[in-house]
């Protein structure tokens, strides 16, 4: 009887391992080609006659949020019924401006723009885990162009493929699409905003209004004006 049980357990373990390996291989076969030929949405961004009933996410640090972020979220809000703007948090990292404060800035920008189907969230830990739990079907990443940002983005996408499979465990990865920035905002970045405010040069302050919406200029100046770029 013991031998029969041992044989059964051995067979069960063997086929379980085979199924797990097949699952991982299938996931890689489906998702790895997107690393080689990523899906990039070029500007002008296409719109559909009707919104897709799909939940999507645009993750970033939004440190601080700016006009480029807002333009992408406005587009996604017109194309999809549900959009998440996710601010990832590293629990061991110290932030000069907290993620919750940045989220409040972004909410203010979206409210001023009249957007009602974008939800701003602060997420600790793996973003893919929270997104998967909420039924997100697509990740979006904002880029200037693939030639400029592709190397770093490919690395992040690789982690977003392996992470769910290894640490899920065996969670099916969420596909990633890339949204090429609006040309008029391609020079805009959170780093540029922080740099302008960090100089403490009043002559540079009018340029800030070209980078962030008027409704948050005062708040961003107050929050980031005392931060010096290292």
Image: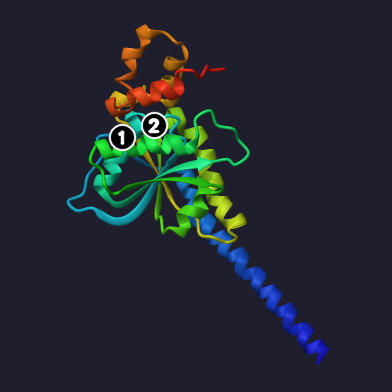
Quadrant (top left, top right, bottom left, bottom right) of the C terminus: top right
Work out whether 166 lies above or below 158.
below
Note whether 92 is above or below 15 in the view shown.
Answer: above
Quickly name the residue at label 2: 65
**Looking at the image, can residue 132 be seen?**
yes
Residue at far left of view: 49
Query: What element does badge 1 sit on?
Result: helix
Q: Quadrant of residue 42?
A: top left
- Label 1 environment density (alpha carbons within 10 Å; few <14, some 14–19, many ≥20): many
Mark 2, mark 1: which one is toward the viewer? Answer: 1
Q: How far separated are the C-alphas under marks 2 and 1?
A: 9 Å
Q: Residue at x 44, y 24 (%)?
A: 223
Near-viewer residue (182 or 206): 206
In the rendering, at what x and y percent does residue 71 appear? Answer: 29, 34
Occupied quadrant, residue 221: top left
Q: Nearer the viewer, residue 198 or 218?
A: 218
Name the residue carrying label 1: 109
Name the residue located 66 percent from the left edge and 69 percent from the top edge.
Answer: 17
């Amino acid at each position: 009887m013991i031998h029969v049980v041992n044989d059964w357990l051995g067979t069960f373990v063997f086929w379980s391992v085979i199924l797990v390996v097949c699952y991982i291989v299938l996931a890689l076969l489906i998702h790895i080609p997107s690393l080689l030929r990523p899906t990039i949405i070029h500007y002008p961004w296409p719109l559909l006659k009707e919104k897709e009933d799909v939940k999507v996410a645009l993750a970033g640090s939004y440190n601080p949020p700016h006009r480029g972020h807002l333009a992408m979220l406005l587009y996604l809000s017109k194309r999809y019924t549900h959009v998440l703007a996710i601010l990832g948090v590293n629990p061991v990292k110290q932030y000069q401006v907290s993620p919750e404060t940045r989220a409040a800035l972004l909410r203010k920008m979206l409210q001023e723009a009249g957007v009602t189907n974008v939800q701003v969230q602060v997420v600790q830990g793996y973003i893919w885990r929270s997104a998967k739990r909420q039924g997100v079907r697509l990740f979006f990443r904002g880029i200037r162009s693939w030639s400029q940002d592709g190397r770093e983005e490919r690395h992040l996408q690789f982690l977003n493929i392996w992470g769910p499979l290894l640490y899920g465990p065996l969670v099916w990865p969420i596909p990633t699409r890339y949204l090429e920035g609006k040309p008029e905002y391609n020079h805009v970045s959170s780093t540029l905003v922080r740099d302008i405010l960090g100089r403490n040069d009043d002559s540079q302050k009018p340029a800030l209004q070209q980078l962030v919406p008027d409704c948050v200029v005062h708040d961003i100046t107050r929050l980031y004006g005392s931060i010096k770029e290292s």
